[in-house]
Image (cartoon, rainbow, N blue to C red):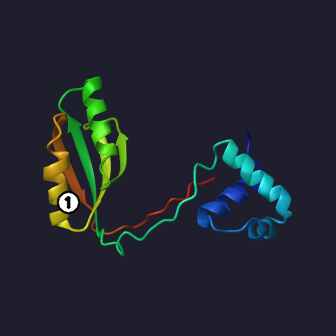
Amino acid sequence: MPLDPSDKKILELLQQNAQLTTKEIASRINLSQTPVHDRIRKLEKEGFIDKYVGLLNRRKLGKSLLVYCNVTLDKQRKESFEEFNAAVISMPEVLECCVVSGNFDYLLKVVANDVEGYNQFYQQKLSVLNSVLHISSFFVMSEVKSTTELPI
């Protein structure tokens, strides 16, 4: 389904504030409410909108430490990847996990309360996995840009 300019504007507005009402969106893109409602339902049905969420302030929740980890597996076997994937999915500290190309196998984005909390995560959850050979941790000093908005 190709997106027209109105669909794109709806997606942009919803990325900025998913709590906008159909009426508010309609007034901003100069359409009536019914077509906007129908377009949003179609965008959801077609998979352009996965879900609606509230983005929380991690610092307010005590998660002030952000760490990126490079993880290298011991063997490049299907079983190793499956074991690691299953383990990481169950770890709430891991916000993102991507299989990557290059000198390591995975890139993880991890949150913790502090360095001690990260050390516990590292020693008790991540490094104990049989499939893990090497972990490199990079502590974020400051965030220059952090967004969830995709360019449309």
Q: Which residue is mark 1?
A: 118
Where in the figure is residue 49, as x and y percent of width and height? 62, 50
What residue lies at 34% left-to-right and 44% top-to-bottom? 89
Q: Quadrant of the N terminus?
A: top right
56 horizontally vs 61: left or right: right
The residue lying at 19 percent from left, 63 percent from top is 117
Task: Answer left or right for 109 relative to 116.
Answer: right
Q: Is residue 5 visible in the rendered structure shown here?
A: no
Measuring 36% from the left and 75% from the top, which residue is drawn there?
A: 60
In the rendered image, which quarter is residue 66 located in? bottom left
Horizontal and vertical percent position of residue 28 = 77, 69
User: Which residue is found at the position 68% from the left and 41% from the top?
Assistant: 46
Residue 65 visible here: yes
Q: Position of residue 119 (x, y in %)?
A: 15, 58
Is residue 51 placed above or below 13 in the rendered structure? Answer: above
Instruction: Give percent across and percent down for residue 118.
Output: 20, 60
Would you place residue 97 above or below residue 142 in this image? above
Q: Is residue 32 left or right of residue 49?
A: right
Name the kind of residue labelled 1 in the image. Tyr
Helix, strand or loop at mark 1: helix
